[in-house]
Image (spheres, rainbow, N blue to C red):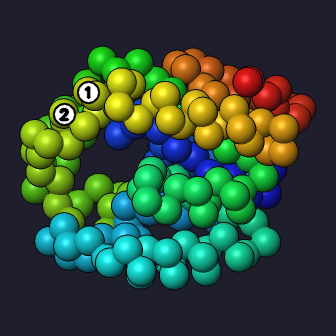
Amino acid sequence: MKRIAIIGSGGSGKSTFARHLGEKLQLNVYHLDAILWKPDWTAVSREQQEAIQLQMVSKENWIIDGNYNGTLDLRLKAADCIIFMDMPRKLCVYRILKRNFLYRNKQRPDMAAGCKERFDLNFLKWVWNYPRDKRPNVLLKLQKLSSEKEIVILTSPKEAKDFIEQLKTENPVTVK
């Protein structure tokens, strides 16, 4: 595991997991939310997103967390390991609401400068609908890549914690 893409719904714990994994493996961690937004929640263009990510994935090792479906295939193709944070919908929504409360009008550590946390009903709906609207396509992509990539699907906070803990003493077990 040298080039790791971490994907999943908003609120699934991608950024926190990526930080812990990066510490454990001593790899650089790139949070797409911190890179692909400008101050005041202005998104960089699709062309800039691709250029930035092509530069990141050309490096020898990395951990990149984030969805950005328009450029997802670019990261999946370059990764040697893909970790899907497939957490329950209610947990993801709870975490979104919790971080909104904790960081209201403040910048989260994994967010771009000038992007203060705010309540966004459309994002909350996206998270709620992720299992129906996005998850099936993600699982299909992972199935197609399973013969050439290490695929890890984590379905609970305990599984995520155990995965990191396993890295202390042995190679992690791949969950397919």
Q: Secondary structure at mark 2?
A: helix
Residue 2 placed where, x, y %? 79, 57
Would you say 137 lies left or right of 153 here? Answer: left
Does any portion of residue 113 appear in the rendered image?
no
Q: Farthest right residue?
A: 170
Would you say 13 lies left or right of 141 here? Answer: left
Residue 111 placed where, x, y %? 33, 61
Does any portion of residue 174 appear in the rendered image?
yes
Would you say 120 lies left or right of 91 here? Answer: left
Q: Residue at x 36, y 24 (%)?
A: 132
Q: Which amino acid, mark 2?
A: Lys
| Residue at which label 2 appears | 125
Residue 74 placed where, x, y %? 60, 63
- Tell me the crowding category of disc 2: few under 14, some 14 to 19, or many 20 or more residues within 10 angstroms, Cα based: few
> Do the CB atoms of the residues marked 1 and 2 lie less than 8 Å apart?
yes
Q: Residue at x 69, y 32 (%)?
A: 143
Depth check, front residue: 50 or 152: 50
| Residue at which label 1 appears | 128
Q: Secondary structure at mark 1?
A: helix
Q: Which amino acid, mark 1?
A: Trp
Residue 87 placed where, x, y %? 46, 24
